[in-house]
Image: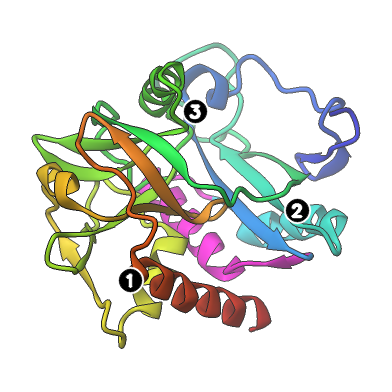
Amino acid sequence: MTDIPAIYQGKLETLEQVKVSPLSRAYTFSDSIYEVIPYFSGKPLCFEEHIDRMKESASLMSMEVNFETVVGDIKVLAETLTNSDGYVYYQISRGIDLVRAHLYEDDLEIERFGYAMPINFPSSPVSAMLCHDERWGKCNIKSTSLLGNVLAMNKAKSLGCQEVVMHKDGFMTEAGASNVFYFDSTGSVRTSSLSENILPGITREILIKALKDSPFCVKEGRCLISDFNNSPCIWLTSSTKGMLPLTALIGTEYRLDESHSGYQEVVKLFNAAMQSHLEA
């Protein structure tokens, strides 16, 4: 892990060399936002959409950020992924306090940090655990305040699962690090509509647009978790997962119907849309 390219306040180093103050508001208050931009053979997926989402998160956090500098940092990191699959993680915090204080000074210097990680993206189905959504209320901001996700996902890990599917009052929100789609008992593709409880996923939007003029047009809305018991297929979408089906969902009667032809057709439409984005 010593030679992973990393950038801090515009200086390109390795991840091991980066030193961050313990009074960074990212550390003391999770007063920070982030993005994960996937690269396939060195090509970014929906670069502008990821930057636009980061701009929206910064605006909702009242953070004044020079995004020309941010884009420059990310492109420097991306150059290390030439001809490789991987991702760039990029984080912006409000800055570093002189002393820990809830009320931040208006003249703090924005803190910028990122790194580039070559990886092979997962492709095998995973299992998940159903759980109540105990995260903070503004999940539409891509904040580093992820303790609720972390606690739930590690509980799921103890049960042999790799993800969680969360709900509030019996209605699905999203997964711990993904959006969720499923076929209901009538054959319709369902997903939760966007709200403050749901991150507007870039890959989520790619899939919805890909299915717009197909027989599998997505129905967004309030999704009852009781639907899962009769669903033949539930799947996740995210920048690093693409589309990934769930084999089982602990807390429900759901089991993946591997022979379900509808899911395979949806995958074909999604893959074609992904390729067109990469070629754009």
Q: Which mark is residue 16?
A: none
Lateral position of residue 120 relative to residue 139, left or right: right
Residue wearing tag 1: 262
Tell me which label, 2 or 1, sits earlier in the chain. Answer: 2
Q: Is residue 134 magenta?
A: no
x and y percent of residue 126 in the render?
47, 41
Q: Nearer the viewer, residue 264 or 193?
A: 264
Residue type highlighted by circle 2: Asp
**CA gap, disc 2 and disc 1:** 41 Å
> Compared to 265, does 95 lie above or below?
above
Residue hosting label 2: 73
Which SS does the magenta portion mostly show? Answer: helix
**How far, Cα to Cα, is label 3 from label 1?**
54 Å
- Indicate the amino acid at tag 1: Gly
Residue 253 in the image: above or below residue 1: below
The residue stretch that appears in magenta: 42-64
Say which amino acid is labelled 3: Glu
- Is residue 56 shown in magenta? yes
Residue denoted by label 3? 105
Task: State how far apart marks 2 and 3 are (Cα).
Answer: 25 Å
User: In the structure shown, which secondary structural element does the residue marked by tag 1 occupy?
Assistant: helix
Classify residue 17 by image quadrant: top right
Is residue 148 toward the left or the right of residue 132 in the image? right
The local crowd at label 1, few if under 14, some if 14 to 19, many if 20 or more residues have their Cα within 10 Å, is some
